[in-house]
Amino acid sequence: EGIRAFAQGLRDWDKDFEETDFKLTDGLEYVKRFRTLTLLKKEELVAYGLPTESAPRLKDNKTVHVEADEYHKMMSQKNTVIIDVRNFYESNIGHFQPPPGGAEFIDPKVRNSRELPKWLGTQEVQEKLQGKKVMMYCTGGIRCERFSALLSQMKESNPEFKTEGEFMVRG
């Protein structure tokens, strides 16, 4: 109940938190719960190593959140790419596999998030995304939120770079 009150307090304090997907689980056994909650102020939730003034803003994110069943259907569409926004280690353990003739799977093969801006900024990657639906996924959502904000920022700064929209799994 305390966490729910805290989440509501954030929403009451700043409207930016109204769309935040707080992931809460009811009925967990006591031994499986986190013992403590620590809050720390961070300049970047997902470290891209960019100066604060040029870091992508989550507010400007234009990505559409879709339910899992819709996301699964989209994987079979042509002219679509799926980017695994997780690190190479996580992707290597397992990743989404689009059906033959459907979306193209892209693994950036990054060791950490700091490598994503450079990867996305390359001409080769932007040409691969040009004019396509861009789907993405990660483990908990925040990396996708940051990556999609970065993608929106790069499209804004380069009017020639256009996609047919960005999509991520809700939650």
Image (tube, grey):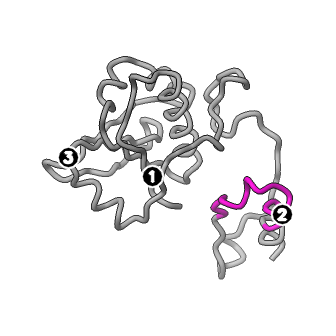
Considering the numbered disc 2 on the image, is that residue within a helix, a strand or a loop? helix
Residue underneath mark 2:
12
Q: Residue furthest bottom?
A: 27
Report the disc number at residue 4: none
Q: How many marks?
A: 3
Which of marks 3 and 1 precedes in the sequence?
A: 3
Where does residue 137 sit, x and y in percent of width and height? 44, 49
Considering the numbered disc 3 on the image, is that residue within a helix, a strand or a loop? loop
Crowdedness of circle 3 by 10 Å Cα count: few (<14), some, many (20+)?
some
Residue underneath mark 1:
168
Please tell me which residue is depicted at 44% across the width and 43% down the height of the picture.
Answer: 90
Whole-angstrom CA distance, mark 1 to mark 2, is 26 Å
Whole-angstrom CA distance, mark 2 to mark 3, is 42 Å
Q: In the image, 129: left or right of 152? A: left
Crowdedness of circle 2 by 10 Å Cα count: few (<14), some, many (20+)?
few
Residue underneath mark 3:
78
Label 2 close to label 3 by CB (< 8 Å): no
Which of marks 3 and 2 precedes in the sequence?
A: 2
Where does residue 138 sit, x and y in percent of width and height? 48, 48
Q: Amino acid at mark 3?
A: Lys
- Tell me the magenta residue range: 8-22
Q: Residue furthest front?
A: 159
Where does residue 134 sit, x and y in percent of width and height? 37, 42
Q: Residue furthest left?
A: 101
Q: Amino acid at mark 2?
A: Asp
Which of marks 2 and 1 precedes in the sequence?
A: 2
Q: Observer-nearest residue: 158 or 120?
A: 158
Please tell me which residue is depicted at 70% across the width and 69% down the height of the picture.
Answer: 33
